[in-house]
Image (cartoon, rainbow, N blue to C red):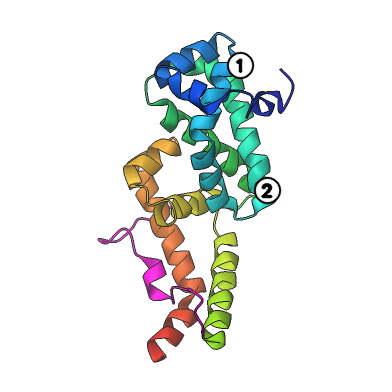
Amino acid sequence: MTDGACLELAGKVPKEGTRVVAEEEMLVRRAQRGDRVAFDALVRLHDQKILRLVMQIVRTPELAKDLYQEAFLKAYRALGNFRFESSFSTWLHRVATNVCLDYLRRQGNREEISTKPGEDGEVELLDTVAEGRPDLNPEHALRAREIGRRIEAALQGLTPRERVVFELRHYQGLRLRAIGELCGTTEETAKNCLFRATQKLRTALEDLAHARKRE
């Protein structure tokens, strides 16, 4: 199967026909036997969730599309290794998360320093800066855009794993246990990673937090 071929099938199977196909497990087992139509049905069931996940992590539409396709290609090639020990959705999200992690690591290898969280463990950093929702006030809209740029720049300063964990927690709303599972690690490790990311972002955005308090 050539690269992209499995995704080119999208649209060729009527949606009603896809809905009629029994359960997801049956689709997976058929796809494992080489049934491309079954795999296409799986793509259609999960494509929007995976695209949103990737987009939240890398934030660039064109790049997100490339990584989204890479995730499904990897899933197709590794489908024979899926043993139904978790849901197919969890397994697919793990594949996509690893694709994003690999990409971020290729952009620059930053040392991951081990740090233990305090009692709170997790800090809602986004509560310390303006929400950034544009309104009819041009000044507020300009400030919202500036905050967005600063947050994006601060995210670039995290290690790949820290960024992924932070994105999954704050933008996907996942629990730490689920994040640990997606990243192939433990809940405690995910908690430590989130703490490090939060501390770094708090330092990088400290002036914004102070400015908001003064408003």
Residue 172: percent from the left, percent from the top? Answer: 43, 51
The tag earlier along the polypeptide, 2 or 1, is 1
Element under disc 1? helix
Report the number of discs: 2
* Left or right: where 128 falls relative to 42: left
Q: Which mark is residue 10?
A: none
The correct choice, above or below, for 124 with respect to 136 in the image is above
Q: Nearer the viewer, residue 28 or 82?
A: 28
Residue to which mark 2 is pinned: 63
Residue 120: percent from the left, percent from the top? Answer: 27, 61
Q: Is residue 134 magenta?
A: yes
Image point 48% across, 67% down: which residue?
201
Quarter in which the N terminus is drawn: top right
Q: Is residue 131 magenta?
A: yes
Q: Nearer the viewer, residue 32 or 82?
A: 32
Stretch of the chain drawn in magenta? 111-136
Separation of disc 2 and disc 1 at Cα?
25 Å
Image point 49% across, 25% down: which residue?
16
The amino acid on which the numbered mark 1 sits, given as a three-letter code, is: Arg
Q: For residue 4, what is the image quadrant?
A: top right
Element under disc 2? helix
The amino acid on which the numbered mark 2 sits, given as a three-letter code, is: Leu
- Bin the neighbour count of mark 1 within 10 Å (Cα to Cα): few under 14, some 14-19, many 20 and up: some
The correct choice, above or below, for 40 with respect to 142 in the image is above
Residue to which mark 1 is pinned: 36
